[in-house]
Amino acid sequence: MTDPKDKLVQKKEEWARERRGLTPQAREEGVSVRHNPNVPSPEKPRLPPGQHLVKGFPVLDLGNQPELPLERWSLDIHGLVENPVTWDWQDFMAQPQNSLVSDFHCVTTWSTFGNRWEGVSFKHLLEVVRPKPEAKYVLFTSYDGYSTNVPLSVLNDDDVLIAHRWNAQPLTREHGGPARMVIPKRYAWKSAKWVKEMVFLAEDRPGFWEVRGYSNTADPWTEDRYS
C-alpha cells in the first residue's frame, strides 16, 4: 500500500517539473519571473501573481501531524550563535509576545488575507542568541521530519514570528501547533510547522522541498516557485 506521504511528494515533484501554477508569462520564459532591483517597478499588488484568494485556511503537510503535548515540546536553537538556547514551553511563553496581522501565500496558488498571529518575533530571538558574523542562513527542522532553509537576511524582519496563536485561538495541530514559523514575504513552505530546531549556518543547506525542485528563495511576487 502506497504511503500517503510518498504520493504527496510524488505529486509535488511532478508540479515542480511541470512548473505548475506559473502565469503564462512565467511559463513562456521557462523561468521564474524575476525583477531587476535597479529598475523602477509598480508597487507590489497585495495578491501575488498566479495566486487566488480563499476563505479559511487549507491544511497541507506531509501526512504526519505530530501530537505534541506542551510538556514535551522544546525548541533547540544552535549553530553559529554566541548564546545557543533550548526553550521549553514555559521559556518560550516567557519571551516578549507580539501580535501581527499578515497575509499568507501557498505555492499551490492559494492565499489568505489578514491572518492575526501571536508569538515571539524572530528579531527578539536574534537578540537572545546573537548570531556570529559568519552566520548567513538558518535551517529549520520540524517534529514531523520536515526541513527548510531561509537566509538570515529574510528572517531579520519585523513580520517574522514563531507563532503559537492564529486568529485569537491557540494554533491547532493541523496548522502546526503548538508552534510554527510565519514568514509572510515567502511562500508558505518556508514557514515550517511544528518547529523543533533552528541551526544557524554559514553556507546554504537546502531543505525537504528545496531538494525536490522547489526554489531556495521562494518570493511570491516574482513567482519564484521552482528551481
Image (cartoon, rainbow, N blue to C red):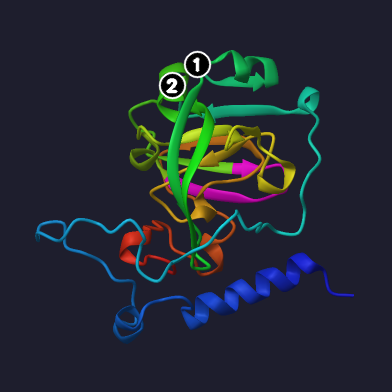
User: What amino acid is at disc 1?
Assistant: Pro
State whether the magenta stretch is mostly helix, strand or loop. strand
Looking at the image, is 67 positioned above or below residue 73?
below
Name the residue at 56% across, 42% down.
Answer: 140
Q: Look at the numbered discs 1 and 2 and tell me whether their residues touch, using CB distance below 8 Å.
A: yes
Compared across the picture, whether 110 is left or right of 176 comes to: left
User: On the rendered image, what quadrant is the C terminus found in?
Assistant: bottom left
Report the disc number at residue 179: none
> Helix or strand or loop: what does disc 2 sit on?
helix
Looking at the image, is 153 positioned above or below residue 216?
above
How far apart marks 1 and 2 lie (CA) works out to 8 Å
Residues drawn in magenta = 141-150
Compared across the picture, whether 89 is left or right of 44 comes to: right
* Residue farthest front in this picture: 55
Pick whichever, 162 or 109, lies toward us: 109
Q: Which residue is mark 2?
A: 124
* Residue farthest bottom in this picture: 28
The image shows a total of numbered marks equal to: 2
Does the segment drawn in magenta span residue 151?
no
Name the residue at 29% across, 81% down.
Answer: 25
Pick whichever, 169 or 75, lies toward us: 169
- Residue 200 in picture, x, y percent from top left: 47, 34
Instruction: Count residues near mark 1 (Cα–Cα under 10 Å), then give few for <14, some for 14-19, many for 20+.
Output: few
Q: Which residue is mark 1?
A: 96
Of the two numbered discs 1 and 2 in the rendering, the one whose residue sits closer to the viewer: 1
User: On the rendered image, what quadrant is the N terminus found in?
Assistant: bottom right
Pick whichever, 80 or 40, lies toward us: 40
- Residue 120 in picture, x, y percent from top left: 51, 25
Q: Which of the 4 image quadrants contains residue 155?
A: top left
